Amino acid sequence: MRLAFLLLLLCFFRSVSAQPTMPAELRVGLAFFSAQGKASVPPVGRVRAFNEEQAREICRRINVVCRVEHMPFADMLPAVEAGQLDLAFGFYLRTPEREQRVAFSDSIGNSSSRLLGTVEGNRRLTSRFGQAIQLDHLRDVRLAAIAGSQQATHIEALPAAQRLKLIQARSMTEVLALLREGKVDLCLVPMLFAFDSLQNQEVGRFEFVGPAMMDGGLGGSVHILLPKNREPLRLAVNQALTAMRSDGSYHRLIRRHFPFNLD
């Protein structure tokens, strides 16, 4: 009986020692879309507040300290790939090209893309093309997108015959400034970030045009980014997300920040 007990203890300690230990601190990147320049302090919008609260709750559940850094969306994936960030929160769409560079958590929601313009600009484009505005029908149009986004990648892959000029911006603030100043005709942006940024804009100045887009990498499930060689961390993050969904805390978090469901 005593021998069996000792063998049981030995198996237990071997199991514990075989489990990978988590670092005491994680470097967490939070993407911002509403500030100009890398040195700017991003305003506390719904997306930023949601991402930060989500990150800190995950860190709490896996018993590590979050060291948060706010940075432009375009800088985060390269930082994860280089091992400079352990986690990156930017509602990243999962694509084959990105899968070659980084790992992904389980889904944290879904995203789609929309064309956004000024009311006057959209009226001129509708008159010019003689039909409802759709991305595939545009010709000789200046389009803005956030640098490093799937929207920018999609525009670059459109047929050359459309003669579209892509202007890449580092934030939604820059995108809206380009529209306001007439330097672009439309922008292609993630619906969630556009919704967040438009909350602080003058009513009646900007409007979405055309349908929500999911195909061609413009929509789908969104994820947290991790370095490819951090499988224990990925599993721990996924376990935390599953627990948050199971106990209802994830949906309560969503309702605190958004008037719609991210799923």
Image (tube, helix red, strand yellow):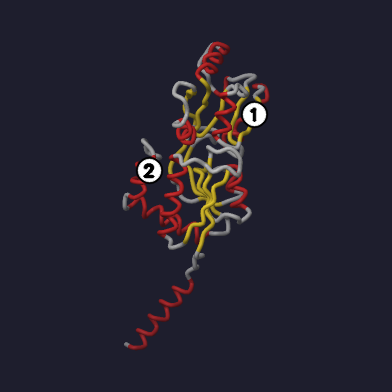
* Amino acid type at mark 1: Leu
Kindly identify which residue carries mark 1: 166
Assign the C terminus to one quadrant of the image.
top left
Crowding near the residue tagged with mark 1, few <14, some 14–19, many ≥20 C-alpha atoms within 10 Å = some
Label 1 and label 2: CA atoms lie apart by 33 Å
* Amino acid type at mark 2: Ile
Q: Secondary structure at mark 2?
A: helix
User: Compared with residue 113, is residue 94 higher up or lower down, i.e. above or below?
Assistant: below
Front in this rendered view, residue 9 or 233:
233
Q: Earlier in the sequence, mark 1 or mark 2?
A: 1
Q: Secondary structure at mark 1?
A: strand
- Left or right of residue 146, residue 18 in this image: left
User: Compared with residue 175, is residue 119 higher up or lower down, i.e. above or below?
Assistant: above
Residue 42 spot, x, y in % from top left: 52, 42
Circles 1 and 2: CB distance less than 8 Å? no
Kindly identify which residue carries mark 2: 254
User: Compared with residue 96, is residue 202 higher up or lower down, i.e. above or below?
Assistant: above
Identity of the residue drawn at 61% across and 52% down: 81
